[in-house]
Image: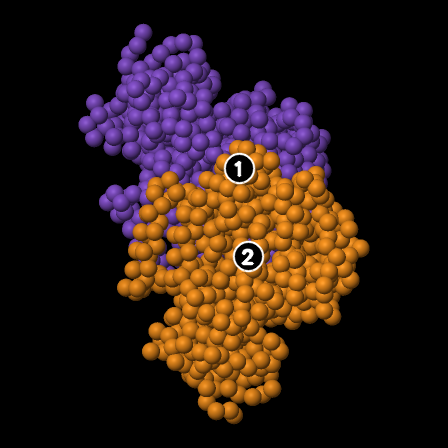
Chain colours: A purple, B orange
Amino acid sequence: MSTRYDVIVIGGGHNGLVNAAYLARAGKKVLVLERRHVLGGAAVTEEIFPGFKFSVCSYVVSLLRPEIIRELDLPRHGLEILPLDGTFTPMPSGDYLWRVNDHAKTRREIARHSRVDAEAYEEFGKAMVAMCRFVKPILAMSPPDPTTLHPRDLRKLFVLGRRFQALPSDDKYALIQLMTMSAADFLDQWFETDVLKATMSASGIIGTFLGVRSPGTAYVLLHHYMGEIDGAFRSWGFSRGGTGAISEAIAGAAREAGAEIRTQAPIARILVKGGRANGVALENGDEILADIISSSVDPHLTFMKMIEPDELPGEFLDEVRRYKFRGSSGKVNLALDALPDFHCLPGPGLHLRGAISISPAVEYMERAYDQAKYGNFSSRPYIDVVIPSLTDPSVAPPGKHVLSCFVQYAPYKLKEGTWEEKREAFGDAVIETLAEHAPNIKNIIAGRQVLTPLDLEREFGLTEGNIFQGELSLEQLFFLRPVPGWAKYRTPIENLYLCGSATHPGGGIMGAPGRLAAMEILKGWKKGKS
Amino acid sequence: MSAAQSIVIIGGGHNALVTAFYLARAGHKPVVLERRGTVGGAAITDEFHSGFRCSTLAHTTGPLRPDVARDMQLEQFDLQMIYPEPRLFAPSLDGRALLLFSDPAKSAAEITKFSAKDAERYVEFHGVLGRMAAVLSQAMTITPPSIDHPSAEDMWNLLQTGRGFRSLGKKDMFRLLRWGPMAVADLVAEWFETELLRATLAARGIFGTALGPWSAGSAAVLLMRAAADGDPAGPAAFPRGGLGALTKAMAAAAARAGAEIRSGAEVAQILIKDGAVNGVILSTGEEVTAKTVISGADPRRTFLKLIDPVHLEPDFLGKVQHYRCLGTAAKVNLALGGLPSFTALQGAAAGGWGANRAMSGRIHIGPEIDYLERAFDASKYGDFSPCPYLDVTIPSLSDPSLAPPGKHVMSIYMQYAPYRLKHGDWPDQRTALGDVVVRTLAAYAPNLPDLILDGAVITPHDLEETYGLTGGHIFHGELALDQLFTMRPLLDWARYRAPLRGLYLCGSGTHPGNGLTGASGANAAREILKDLR
């Protein structure tokens, strides 16, 4: 039963689908194989409780590369981004910080806390835009190898150097600091209001096993700042119908281009002959052949689970073993009969339509991290809350709501006990934390789903529950991602490529790895393969 | 108004003395103005209890950069260095001892007692670090390049560094790139399985910083240290007579070369006229005119205390304000009636090496990575560590001249003691800090408390007030990735020059600025001489 394909893409996550779409558009015969019954990987919408549809894992969108939206014409395939306006941070003092997209409003709000900070906020915004301008082209390039003298790599490095040199002195300064400092230290230079620094620094730790005071988190701050919808930096949004709708749109584009997509097709192993990948074997025993295998799952699954160790050089395997996952976050999804009522700003209102950030103080954030360092989940975690049903009523029954909590820290490796035992305790800690700000939460919960890092691993194939398929730490970025010497989507096995978030430029619903990997694969073809 | 002097050097610390020496050797007549009664800055020896002397602050050299040591010929000024073996002894709470020697084979033999695998890996690690050190040490000798307008010399230096880098081969090249931004805890975990060994080697990545072993970038600090001494155990080198003997010899060498050294001369202000320095005013009101003023003091003190702000761009001042310079270290010096007996060195545990010899080098207290990290945690919230990381020496073991016969001095470097306390202030916490240090050591050497005749506690506050280290930072500014090389102290101002004509920096607040290596002083002198030509 073997029809031969040009490319088999392992995993139907957003990167796998983007990868497939681009390859299919280039005229290749592409097959996507997804283990689960739904497409989307970590970008899925599922009806957990009757009538309540959840973006089970990743819950907001903004990093999705505009060129991908454009080139794949995703709006025509049903992608619709609804704005997520602002971030609301309740404070124990009974006060709050509420930033919205309207600059004037936000300015007034921050001035309420500190006039100086209101001024600085404008400047900060400008500076970050400049930084994003510098970094964005890097997100769209496949990384050079700094250890070769190959003209192509040297040119890339040279161009980077020149562009850096061309920056105004202050931007150079900020850039170096962003690449090396901690989010908290970096923000300390700009602002004095603690709650503002705490909330802003939060985007520096999302998905990492680092604290707001850990060097390197300033970069992650920037990584999240890159958020872009219709060209406007730092504006996040929901996709109508949940993040699953994004995957569906991309799948639509891929199918239209002729790609074939199969769900419930778990792969047992990648077929390798004489150092070349030439197909895959499904768990049901079927073997499917292809010229190229493009894996969107993480390096651990790809190299430790799907390939016989003797097919790989020992040193490469060591590097793969060294690759850090360290999941640090969990997800709690709630079906609600009513809206939460925050005592610092009672009643329903626009503040519930944006992100609600439980990040009252920098020290609060850092202490949450300290607990995780020693193998416990945070008793008072950082929580990023959204209520999509307010913006997109289609995801909940009339009058009811879905609330999703992104929770940090929840270390994959617990010091005592297992996640099986701790799951509900973890869920309770989240509810307790929310209840401190919105006491009525306990009485309005119609259903609760708790996803621990272990669940993320089992359900969604995210090793150690890392939502970015590997730490976004400096030593695992750019030409070092996923492992030194193999940052160009290629692997020691010929015709086997990586195209997931474990490759440059990394995680978030960005799609860039899938696209860049497709480019590299096609380049390979030109070099007279087939 | 005294006779016009051409060159003034502020501060008589080791870097300033190195700069003075090189300028004098080139035929100039620099005047070193030291605030205190003796030169030496943080490298001094005091008699803190009658008959008992020890290195008051720093207690081992970095070590001194070989070419600097050669040029200054310090042995001629009766400097004798002592190189104890083993270099390092680390006790574990369960009464085991880890000994590390200069000879990796000897160290491996000791490590085997913990793990045969680690013993093997240690020899390999020793080799890798050594190779990297060779490349990095070259980078420590160059003046950080100008990013906007690299000179021909800059390009040449970069080329040299690049060639050194390439000579490492692909594997080590990637290692170096990968290690730089790593957390030292991850680095040692990749190599070793023995917790005590991990923690002992990791300590070099946090020494003198506001980082914990889990902080990214701490591996870079370890690499910088390795550039001065590629041995994973770190340096153990004591001048006979304590570190004061080192700086005394440096002062003598500088003086013989033609430098004038004035102690008890505190500079109150640097005089500026039309954007150029014009001399300094001493606290006595005496004015010393000079066309060249070189500050061995840290950048914050130099730019924020000694210069009238009107002379500096607000933007530049703002950046100096943000220069992170908050120390985490304290020092405790003890006069002992006898030798402490470490449980880990009883009988066979000493590993055939007599207990005395085993503790003649550095003694590392900090048995586990988590122990070190917890010590760090406390400081993040403004408390000093209840269970601190300690780097201890008993110099009187190898240098009896420091204490009366049969008696000893113990020099204890303590981390973390944050400059800014959340509760109370340092003068009140002094005793509490001393007690914590003694209690911590007593867990490993139970008889210690009974041996103590007297002690001196030096808090971060003292480091600032008495020794002029702003924020109590022993390295004149945090060793963070954004404050190193072309960014030390500030981007665009890493070439030992300041925004005012005739003003230079030569202290640890400049590249490479870490430990007692004299590198900053030597690099600065090279740049200054170019301008003086």
Q: Amino acid at mark 1?
A: Ala
Residue A447, percent from left and from top: 64, 25
Residue A270 left/right relative to B80: left
Residue B498 percent coordinates (x, y): 43, 72
**SS of the residue under disc 2:** loop
N-terminal label among 2 and 1: 2
Label 2 sits on residue = B83
- State whether residue B229 is above or below residue A415: below
**Residue lying farthest to the top in this orientation:** A1
Instruction: Identify the residue shown where x is 29% and y is 43%.
Output: A148
Circle 2 or circle 1, nearest the eye: 2
Label 1 marks which chain's residue?
Answer: B
- How packed mark 1 is, by other alpha carbons closer than 10 Å (few <14, some 14-19, many 20 or more), is many
Q: Position of residue A39 (x, y in %)?
A: 44, 22
Viewer-closest of B299 and B19? B19
Left or right: where does residue B71 sit relative to residue A118?
left
- Which of the labelled discs sits on residue B119, or is there none? 1
Secondary structure, mark 1, is helix
